[in-house]
Image: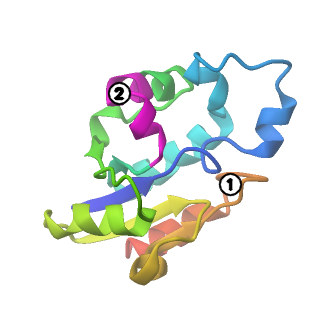
Amino acid sequence: MKVLFLDIDGVLNSETFMTSLPFCLEDDLRDNIDSQAVSVLNEIIEKSDSKIVISSTWRKIYPLPKIVEALENKGFKHSNKIIGCTPIYDVGVRGDEIQEWLDHMAIDSFAILDDDSDMKNLKPHLVQTTWKEGLQPEHIERVLNILEL
């Protein structure tokens, strides 16, 4: 099994996207997801056949079905590939949460999509986006290389 750990802020949205909106309703998650970034994510999933684990801080605020619904409303085609979320630590770094998940699962390979770099020893698996631009087509090949496709 191939797994993609998915952050949302700075990956499926960005400063460029958020400032292009005429307004944003905080309660409507769809307003906080860029359909162009979702299109890139769709392509990654189609080419890699990987499963998705949500590692975003959104999992601390919203139940997983609400996140899935927001993704689907922005064109995400692979909801059946979302297999869960990383554990939540009160204090810690994202890399620790991902490592905890990995410690309890048997997988073949994994990649991390995130705009932060707090991955510790998992950094070789990180495809780092930026808050400025989010997920871009040029990230696809790097993800696929990490997943060894």
Specify the segment rendered in magenta.
56-68
- The N terminus appears in which quarter of the rendering? bottom left
Is residue 63 in the magenta section? yes
Estimate the x, y position of residue 56 in percent, counting from the top left. 47, 47
Of the numbered discs in the image, which one, if any, rests on residue 63?
A: 2
Spatial separation of the CA atoms under disc 2 and disc 1: 26 Å
Residue at point 22% right, 71% down?
Answer: 108
User: Residue 113, percent across and down?
Assistant: 51, 59
Q: Amino acid at mark 2?
A: Pro
Count of picture labels:
2
Q: Residue at x 33, y 63 (%)?
A: 98
What kind of element bears circle 2? Answer: loop
Q: Which class describes the residues within 10 Å of circle 2: few (<14), some (14-19), or many (20+)?
A: few
The quarter of the rendered structure image containing the C terminus is: bottom left
Which mark identifies residue 103?
none
Residue 108 higher or lower than 19, as above or below: below
* Kind of element beneath mark 1: loop
Principal SS element in the magenta part? helix
Q: Earlier in the sequence, mark 2 or mark 1?
A: 2
* Residue at image coords 57%, 25%: 74
- Identify the amino acid type marked 1: Gln
Q: Return the residue nearer the eye: 112 or 118.
A: 118
Mark identifier at residue 136: 1
